[in-house]
Image (cartoon, coloured by chain):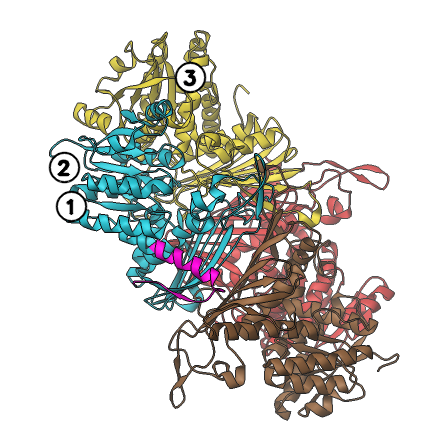
Chain colours: A red, B yellow, C cyan, D brown
Amino acid sequence: MQSNRPLGVAIVGHSFMGRAHSQGWRNVASVFDVPAFERTVLVGRDPDRAREAAAGLGWSDSSADWRAAVTRDDVDIVDICAPGMLHAEIAVAALRAGKHVLVEKPLANTLAEAEEMASVAESAAVRGQIAMVGFNYRRMPALALARSMIADGRIGAPAQMRVAYYQDWLSDPTAAMSWRLRKEQAGSGALGDLGSHAVDQVRFLLGDDVESVSARMRTFTSRRPGPHGLEDVTVDDAAWATLVTDGGTVASIEVSRVTTGRKNALQIEVYGDGGSLRFDLERPNELWFHDAGLPAAEQGERRILVTEPEHPYLDGWWPQGHVLGWEHTFTHEVRDLLFGAADHTNPAPSFADGLAVQQVLDAIEVSDQKQNQTIDIRGV
Amino acid sequence: MQSNRPLGVAIVGHSFMGRAHSQGWRNVASVFDVPAFERTVLVGRDPDRAREAAAGLGWSDSSADWRAAVTRDDVDIVDICAPGMLHAEIAVAALRAGKHVLVEKPLANTLAEAEEMASVAESAAVRGQIAMVGFNYRRMPALALARSMIADGRIGAPAQMRVAYYQDWLSDPTAAMSWRLRKEQAGSGALGDLGSHAVDQVRFLLGDDVESVSARMRTFTSRRPGPHGLEDVTVDDAAWATLVTDGGTVASIEVSRVTTGRKNALQIEVYGDGGSLRFDLERPNELWFHDAGLPAAEQGERRILVTEPEHPYLDGWWPQGHVLGWEHTFTHEVRDLLFGAADHTNPAPSFADGLAVQQVLDAIEVSDQKQNQTIDIRGV
Amino acid sequence: MQSNRPLGVAIVGHSFMGRAHSQGWRNVASVFDVPAFERTVLVGRDPDRAREAAAGLGWSDSSADWRAAVTRDDVDIVDICAPGMLHAEIAVAALRAGKHVLVEKPLANTLAEAEEMASVAESAAVRGQIAMVGFNYRRMPALALARSMIADGRIGAPAQMRVAYYQDWLSDPTAAMSWRLRKEQAGSGALGDLGSHAVDQVRFLLGDDVESVSARMRTFTSRRPGPHGLEDVTVDDAAWATLVTDGGTVASIEVSRVTTGRKNALQIEVYGDGGSLRFDLERPNELWFHDAGLPAAEQGERRILVTEPEHPYLDGWWPQGHVLGWEHTFTHEVRDLLFGAADHTNPAPSFADGLAVQQVLDAIEVSDQKQNQTIDIRGV
Amino acid sequence: MQSNRPLGVAIVGHSFMGRAHSQGWRNVASVFDVPAFERTVLVGRDPDRAREAAAGLGWSDSSADWRAAVTRDDVDIVDICAPGMLHAEIAVAALRAGKHVLVEKPLANTLAEAEEMASVAESAAVRGQIAMVGFNYRRMPALALARSMIADGRIGAPAQMRVAYYQDWLSDPTAAMSWRLRKEQAGSGALGDLGSHAVDQVRFLLGDDVESVSARMRTFTSRRPGPHGLEDVTVDDAAWATLVTDGGTVASIEVSRVTTGRKNALQIEVYGDGGSLRFDLERPNELWFHDAGLPAAEQGERRILVTEPEHPYLDGWWPQGHVLGWEHTFTHEVRDLLFGAADHTNPAPSFADGLAVQQVLDAIEVSDQKQNQTIDIRGV
């Protein structure tokens, strides 16, 4: 790869995730003292729109040919924000071309694709290549703090965990059909989109693997209006699961796109025998901590405003109390990716982590089909 | 039964629930314009302690013989706050003696007992007798308001519901063994104690029956120190279930006694296609309501402080903003019982409701034993 | 006074405050192990309504002659819930008759009356008589806890304090005229009603006296509809003040009856150099505590749910998490009064405390008339 | 000024505010469809550090000569983030050179400077030049929404308002002396720094001018350790004021740097006769709204999550629920500045607005010196 020149970055995709990742790339060097890099090229399906997006989002060049772009000599890092069904093909090509790769979550639409990607990434790792999956909430300062507090034993041994991820943009039963509601294109519904974050947080916060799963899925509105009349919705509106980890924790998961009034509520609770932690993505700068080691009369759940220089990622930003937003997770993600690429050390979550999440999602679907019966996760 | 004299009330038990019910009986006539009644007799196992409790809690007489007390001529209502394993015997005796009966929840320790009680109550109803089970949270004003708002369609068709009931008095793995942790005495652990309230709220708030259940139970600390060394804990610390109702709603339930930092957190959320409602027993005077019918720019979850004269039960109490506490549910419970006894109309929840809850709890245990498989509720 | 017989109690008044105090008297002996007492007589202006109130609220006898009632031989304690303009006359008569006295707040309508009452109480104290003023919020467990934490140095030296007391029953400018809005009957508006609690909390929580005051008052709606047309409102809707205490703390006070959406929001914040405390009467079971002595990364304001047996007054009530309501302050008030009467030790707040509050309220009115200029409190 | 080429921008300063404004300039064109512009030059006192800052923050050129930089032909807009004592000189030079100007708040350190600046800006306006002061919180979406809701009558006629701005970085009485605590350099303490925002919000949200002021200031820690021993602190730690506006609203203001536990808490409440609004900068994506026009049983303060496309500035950002942070106010500020510069229409707040705030701050200091007496604002 590159010797002394800055790392070249290619981004594939410029819709929602492409814009959010670009925000990260645009700002990371002004906030953190990262290795030098260049925003080399943005890839989009339509040449004109790609050109316009590159100009608007701050990329030097544009391309409508992802295969050519991700194998360019001046590209060292490929950031894949394309739809999930393209993840595997692009990531494998980029890794085989010797590039570092960041793939937006979930890793892939199918378990088979995820397995292939993880396998290719494993080989690439030998050559010092990074393969990272974009579970960006790991880099929300409050959740990074939660992880380190749990690892440090601040809540004792975790017994129970709860992760809900609630949105409501499908609450209205008359809302229109879209590609996101067709299984062949989207893979799954709330499960893959929101449940993948939920499962990743279980693994991230506890540092555990998931051993078994019991689950239920539900589509509340089974037909929605398309341009030519009512169409079948073939993905889930909501899913529920209980997971048992190899550390003995039971985690309850609930994800939904029809929980009216919740806009982007990733709600996490972890209960240990020495304390508990709580987080809500709608108030992302706050981590709630109950310390059962304090005197009984003074115990209480406390709101840590995660904006101190002592907190993860905060030293690069503003003075205390000057809160960050949702998008800053991407700045942190590309920061860590850049350090990883420079050091040839893979920052978590790796493709292996992405695959582990996929295995759990797959088991959830199987359990749902088998009367919610407990399913062991293969390979654990 | 009685003609013109006040209704005579006997209460059985004077520990936690006996004290709480007594608080209700002591105050109800000062707050609401209820039918005349007398606090006739308090029953306790030990004659001396019963006498002292009767004096302290405001009962005219005391007795150590429940059978004699509940059949006294001057007793019309029997309020059973004895341990769960005695519910069936006392309730059946009182009903057969022609008395109105209130039984503290859960209805019984076993399904067989619950079935017998419901059957006897059904016969007694023909004679105008009331048989009520003490799911007191139905009479928390905020939850009574929630019920009426759902019935009035204020959140549209309920799709999802969440009920968590969190306590933490068993978080500490070194806490001592007690009778509450032995299955033969307590029936079950968090499931019967907290889960019965949770299931009752599903039925109450939705007005639905539960059709099927998938569930998991867990004992995190399996041995605890007793007076003679470590003993086996034979009940659950926590339980999880998803319930499907005959109205098509999916309700997720989680109950636990090891959720550190939660003291008495019965947390309820109901999501409909037109809005949502949320409640937390640790802030019992508040009901949170999201109305999806408002203009998008002004929508938000709103905190209804349920202390207005327009709210259920509030007209008897204080001016707005002067909040009530946990115990007031019992005042409301005996209020409705008294009106029911006078009118010979059974206030909900009836013994049939108590039995329905018991059937769900039983199915949860079966599902847990069968790898969390979905269990149909018998008889629905 | 009484030798071996129970203490006899007379209550004067049976509207809002009379009902609330009665609730306290009715329950205190079932919750706390208090000295024996009897609810001897209730006094009301109208004999029939007094008789009915006595029966409903649980008093043995009734009377329409307060002078006769408060001097009865079988009465030892007089609880005065009559309108403010009668406080002085009744309290002085009762004290002169050798009775213990509890007067609902504020102590009196005028400073002159308050001074007389404090003087008579001082003489009575020599004879072992109790004279207490009913600032009930001192006995809200969360505020009692706050007081002891401040005294114990848990927030270091208090620099700033904020007390707002917000209600909204006069927000609507078309709401009707009433006696509460006429200065000659009510004394003042929000200032006396709500401001007296606010000033008492400054003195109570800090343990300080107030040295000087700068203040502003405002009547937003100056005429309101009476039965015979528009009438002048002669009391304040809202008042603002800054107080400087002899401990060097600056306290900002704001009271209002037109703060739309706030129903009974006594909001208190105390900031010391080692931490801070916060309270809101609409969530009375919670005390928020920030401990600046913890490591920076773990600091945060914590919600102490004040329902533990370690908390003030809580050992008599329910298990943890089973919250109390507004009225319980009265149970605690009469509890402490009973112990005081038995011990001949005056529980705070004394009439001298009531007078001190009155002096501050008086200075607030003077400052408002003098262009908000700082006024020194006389006699401090 | 410029014809067809992009607008050239110079920024003066690269510490806290220079970094925050740069974040705005760096991202605005990727989020909003703004007029074309270039980040031409960054000015700093030290040439090396300026060069490094320009590279890091994304400016094409750097300079250590502000006078030369702000008069460059290729510069059309001057963004002044230098210390307050330089505001007047730089702004006047830039305006006289025909440039548009944005000055960070407060407008100036002295009233005389502010008056000169407003006067020069008035002349420049005739030539189509923009002069804007950087009260960035006007462009926090939740506060922009609040302003439009008040203007639309959604809370009726505002009676009372409360603005507190709490920080705590001076809570510790042993914290070190710094230039910010010397009057000759900093102008004032909490008053100028935090109070200027507070006063601006009163004017902004109500659309009113301030007519009179009563105020108190306090320095709790009067000496702090400097490099050569204890030094006198000559600015305020905290200030309190009540303001009366020409619309008849009374606004209470409290600002402090010693309110332990509050990190950046700009807390705003506005109470009208038809509703109320509430905001806290520590949760900046939320606006709380109480609508008194709803049925009493359903009223409550509601949390509007201000992330909908219908909300101010939100159409350029992320989907609903994906919250923004503190810094985004600067992106919005430069957005509006660019549109203003292109249209030759001055976006509020103008220098005249900045002067009006300064007049209030000045009156607060005078009132504090005159025993808190009410001071009329000159020229209103």
In percent of the image, x 59 and y 79: which residue is there? A33
Q: Disc 1: which chain? A: C
| Both marks 1 and 3 on one chain | no
A269 over C317 or under it: above or below: below
Tell me the quarter of the image containing the N terminus of chain A. Answer: bottom right
Q: Position of residue D104 (x, y in %)?
A: 64, 77
Task: Give the amino acid type for the residue marked by disc 1 in the picture.
Answer: Gly
Q: Are marks 2 and 1 on the same chain?
A: yes
Mark positioned earlier in the residue sequence (2 or 1): 2
In magenta, the rendered stretch is: C357-379
Q: Nearer the viewer, mark 2 or mark 3?
A: 2
Q: Against C23, is A10 above or below?
A: below
**Which of the two residues, C66 or B141, is positioned nearer the viewer here?**
C66
Mark sitting on residue C128: 1
> Which numbered dot is residue C1?
2
Circle 3: element type: strand
- The reply, left or right, for residue D167 in relation to residue D99 is left
Instruction: Reply yes or no: does residue D182 show up in magenta.
Output: no
Tell me if mark 2 has few (under 14), some (14-19) or many (20+) residues whose alpha carbon lies within 10 angstroms of its own. some
The Cα–Cα distance between marks 1 and 3, rounded to whole angstroms, is 54 Å
Tell me, yes or no, whether the two marked residues, 2 and 1, touch with CB atoms within 8 Å: yes
Question: Where, by quadrant of the figure, is residue B150 drawn?
Answer: top right
Q: In this rendering, is residue C242 above or below D126?
A: above
For residue A166, side relative to residue A246 (left or right): right
Label 3 belongs to which residue? B131
Question: What percent of the width, then of the height, locates residue A363?
Answer: 59, 45
Q: CA distance from mark 2 to mark 3?
A: 50 Å
Q: Position of residue A84 (x, y in %)?
A: 71, 55
Residue that protrudes farthest toward the left in the picture: C3
Depth check: B369 or C29 in front?
A: C29
Q: Chain of mark 2?
A: C
Residue C6 visible in rendering: yes
